[in-house]
Image (cartoon, rainbow, N blue to C red):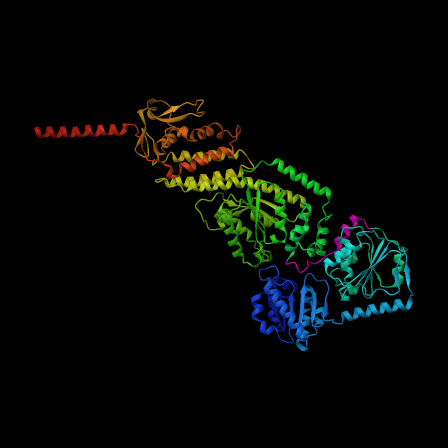
């Protein structure tokens, strides 16, 4: 039986091994979790079985140590039982080899040859070579015979040839070098049994970094397995690694032709200029080394163009292009912002990965940021800091990203460390093993926490590999829930490697109607993201500066909008009794409009004036609520305190009032009302009088100068209604909103101690009733007298 231990089902599917195909294969079974592996222990540890174990099985999860224990048991069992085959496969491996009954191979080789091995294992005892070399297990033997024949020809035809050209570098394998040739004039270096990108990158940087060579000769094969033809990969590393020999002509001396190499993933390097496949022949190498063959030089711009001919497949040790883009972006951001790349936690293997190099050149003309670019970053960062005013307090930022542990935590922390008044926290390191609903629940729990509620949320578009694979980003759901269930003032900035416009549009405008309404008051008709910063940008310096700029702006908005929303909720939830449904409906509508206007005022300042007028309208509306203030011929507060009597029904301004109008003076710059009877006052009974009467009667003030009301009234009349002349400030808005929070809180109403005017209307009605009763009594008396 063949068991495949791989926690990435999609990885197998990418190579044609879907769940259906596994089920159809009677002798192949996939195990993708630790529970399943443990349950099958008795069936697995049996002679004759083949266990293919992915090197990074559950390595990035909390189950890492337990999975490692299982691997050690498999290795021990294989050492004790030679008929039991253990295969370790990995995306980071570029070569394959067998050591007794244990094999090591790249993941693509495993899945490409798995069917051939399974078919072979049904009829015969499984020859593990079929897993390494497919239907041609003799491929390695054929390669060795071809090399041996080449050796024999060179020995037979030539005596020792000494090449004195000082401009040549001859790289020879540790075993199987060309017989009878020596480079005494230039340089010789031996390449040993290396296969990983980290090892090959180190070889290039060590041996080709100090001197410029006229040409470089490299073997088509080196290492434990010839038919991996790692010389092609070495040639690619030379071309993708900045250095003095990046443009140097490369001659790959080979004992096989193009037909044997065409299936190699690095074959495309042979399509590019100044890379030549030549015979592994002493005479041929000597002819190219002595300069008798002339070839045009390669320029840097030509290199960029030539590398477009190269097409590399994403290594299988990346879950997807999404993961690869993140590693590439972390590296770019770290370099651009002068952060030590090693501090990001980005592995050396990731930094030296051939695909990362290839991807950089595919999208960039220069994969490194030089001193000038760094200087430019510092200057531009200082310019952003100089332009921004100080925040009212330190703003808290929550970064939500499943790739946060890949190095984004270090990069963002370091970047924000250069910016005052921003504190940062991270969430997402454990998302890989969580379901979508669990991720949503965890994010909301963090955001709802009173002690740690963020002002700004930096939200990755795809928060799990599952979401990325299915194309269903739960970030849209999280955005909705933050805006509708927590606080719409929390600013949500999308920080993602996605560059698909349709994804961004999806988050820019999310209809609330798609979700059940969870609260009676929720500002705005739609919710959407408040900004976007691309991880995946050719210019990482600009992306980093964009993030700083976005954070300043978002924090500024959040500190105002979050507080305003909380206050609006208090106003909306007023417990003042007997307010009509009509007023409460208008209250909701006016608050929503005002909130939207305040949001837009960050782009259009005059919208603060409109928001001020919208809020002032709420106070005008509440003054028309008869439970608070009733007008007419007789004006009352709370239904029984008379504050004004109309003296002449034909002259409404001719009134007796319980409030005196006091003009502004040095000690009080705004006119105000005090509780004092005025027998005749021709001032109209306005919103100012009504509000003053309610404040003095129901809230226990002796003078409206003890409140902010006179200032609020004057700001409305002098500035609020004239947006073209003067702009309302944030301080003006906060003064009005704080006053409304106070006013709509029933606890702030005092025990009524003031006695109003005599109710003239009531007195007239009393006299009319008495007169009517007296007339009726007189009529009865006259009747009895008769």
Q: As rendered, which of 177 and 500 lies closer to the eye?
A: 177
Quarter holding the N terminus is bottom right
* Residue furthest out toward the left: 786
Q: As rendered, which of 358 and 405 lies closer to the eye?
A: 405
Quarter holding the C terminus is top left
Asked if residue 539 can be seen in this view, the reply is no
Q: Name the residue: 61% across, 53% down.
A: 405
**Residue 166 is drawn in which quadrant?**
bottom right
Asked if residue 546 can be seen in this view, the reply is yes
Magenta stretch encompasses residue 306: yes
**Residue 104 is drawn in which quadrant?**
bottom right
> Residue 318: x, y in percent?
65, 58
Q: Is residue 573 above or below residue 63?
A: above
Magenta-colored span: 298-319
Magenta stretch encompasses residue 682: no
> Residue 532: x, y in percent?
60, 45
> Residue 361: x, y in percent?
73, 51
Q: Is residue 464 left or right of residue 209?
A: left
Q: As rendered, which of 434 and 451 lies closer to the eye?
A: 451
Q: Is residue 501 above or below residue 660?
A: below
Q: Name the residue: 45% across, 22% down.
A: 666
Q: Is residue 406 left or right of residue 160?
A: left
> Residue 731: x, y in percent?
50, 33
């Amino acid at each position: 039986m063949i068991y495949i231990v791989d926690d990435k089902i999609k990885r197998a599917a990418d190579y044609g091994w879907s769940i259906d195909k596994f089920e159809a294969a009677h002798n192949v079974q996939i195990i993708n979790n630790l529970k399943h592996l443990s349950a099958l222990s008795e069936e697995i540890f049996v002679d004759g079985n083949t266990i293919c174990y992915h090197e990074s099985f559950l390595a990035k999860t909390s189950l890492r140590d337990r999975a490692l224990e299982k691997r050690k048991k498999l290795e021990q069992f294989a050492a004790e039982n030679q008929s039991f085959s253990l295969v370790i496969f990995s995306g980071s491996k570029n070569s394959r080899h067998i050591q007794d009954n244990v094999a090591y191979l790249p993941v693509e080789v495993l899945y490409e040859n798995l069917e051939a091995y399974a078919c072979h294992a049904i009829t015969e005892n499984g020859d593990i070579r079929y897993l390494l070399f497919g239907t041609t297990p003799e491929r390695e033997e054929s390669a060795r015979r071809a090399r041996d024949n080449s050796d024999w020809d060179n020995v037979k035809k030539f005596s020792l040839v000494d090449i004195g050209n000082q401009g040549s570098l001859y790289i020879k394998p540790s075993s199987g070098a060309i017989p009878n040739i020596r480079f005494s004039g230039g340089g010789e270096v031996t390449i040993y049994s290396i296969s990983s990108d980290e090892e090959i990158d180190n070889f290039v940087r060590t041996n080709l970094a100090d001197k410029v060579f006229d040409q470089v000769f490299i073997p088509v094969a080196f290492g434990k397995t010839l038919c991996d033809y790692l010389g092609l990969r070495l040639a690619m590393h030379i071309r993708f690694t900045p250095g003095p020999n990046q443009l140097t002509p490369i001659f790959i001396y080979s004992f096989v032709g193009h037909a044997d190499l065409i299936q190699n993933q690095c074959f495309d390097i042979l399509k590019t200029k100044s890379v030549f496949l030549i015979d592994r022949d002493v005479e041929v190498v000597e002819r190219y080394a002595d300069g008798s063959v002339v070839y045009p030089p390669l320029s840097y711009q030509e290199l960029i163009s030539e590398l477009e001919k190269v097409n590399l497949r994403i290594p299988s040790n990346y879950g997807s292009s999404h993961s690869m883009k993140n590693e590439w972006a972390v590296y770019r951001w770290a370099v651009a912002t002068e952060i030590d790349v090693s501090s990001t936690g980005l592995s050396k293997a990731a930094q030296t990965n051939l695909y990362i190099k290839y991807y950089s050149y595919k999208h960039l003309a220069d994969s490194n940021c030089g001193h000038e670019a760094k200087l430019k970053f510092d200057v531009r960062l200082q310019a952003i800091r100089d332009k921004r005013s100080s925040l009212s307090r330190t703003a808290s930022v929550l970064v939500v990203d499943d790739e946060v542990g890949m190095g984004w935590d270090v990069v963002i922390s370091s970047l924000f460390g250069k910016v005052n008044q921003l504190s940062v926290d991270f969430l997402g390191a454990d998302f890989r093993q969580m379901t979508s609903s669990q991720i949503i629940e965890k994010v909301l729990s963090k955001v709802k926490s009173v002690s740690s509620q963020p002002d700004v949320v930096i939200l990755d578009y795809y928060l799990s590999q599952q979401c990325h694979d299915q194309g269903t980003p739960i970030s849209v759901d999280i955005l909705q829930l933050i805006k509708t269930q927590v606080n719409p003032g929390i600013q949500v900035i999308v920080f993602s490697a996605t560059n698909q416009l349709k994804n961004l549009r999806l988050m820019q405008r999310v209809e609330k109607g798609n979700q059940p309404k969870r609260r009676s008051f929720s500002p705005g008709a739609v919710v959407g993201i408040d900004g976007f910063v691309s991880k995946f940008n050719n210019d990482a310096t600009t992306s980093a500066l964009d993030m700083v700029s976005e954070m300043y702006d978002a924090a500024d908005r959040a500190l105002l909008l979050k507080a305003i929303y909380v206050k609006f909720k208090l106003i909306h939830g007023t417990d003042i009794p007997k307010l009509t449904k009509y007023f409460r409906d208008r209250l909701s509508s006016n608050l929503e409009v005002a909130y939207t206007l305040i949001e837009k005022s960050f782009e259009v300042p005059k919208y603060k004036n409109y928001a001020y007028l919208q809020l002032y309208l709420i106070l005008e509306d509440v003054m028309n609520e008869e439970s608070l203030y009733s007008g007419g011929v007789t004006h009352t507060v709370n239904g029984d305190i008379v504050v004004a009597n109309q003296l002449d029904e034909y002259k409404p301004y001719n009134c007796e009032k319980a409030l005196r109008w006091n003009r502004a003076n040095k000690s009080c710059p705004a006119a105000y009302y005090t509780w004092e009877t005025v027998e005749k006052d021709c001032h109209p009974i306005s919103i100012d009088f009504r509000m003053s009467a309610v404040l003095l009667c129901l809230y226990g003030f002796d003078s409206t100068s003890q409140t902010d009301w006179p200032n609020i009234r004057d700001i409305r009349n002098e500035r609020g209604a004239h947006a073209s002349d003067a702009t309302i400030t944030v301080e003006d808005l906060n003064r009005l909103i704080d006053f409304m929070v106070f006013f709509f809180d029933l606890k702030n109403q005092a025990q009524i101690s003031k006695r109003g005017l005599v109710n003239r209307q009531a007195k007239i009605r009393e006299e009319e009733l008495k007169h009517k009763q007296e007339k009726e009594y007189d009529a009865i008396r006259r009747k009895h007298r008769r």
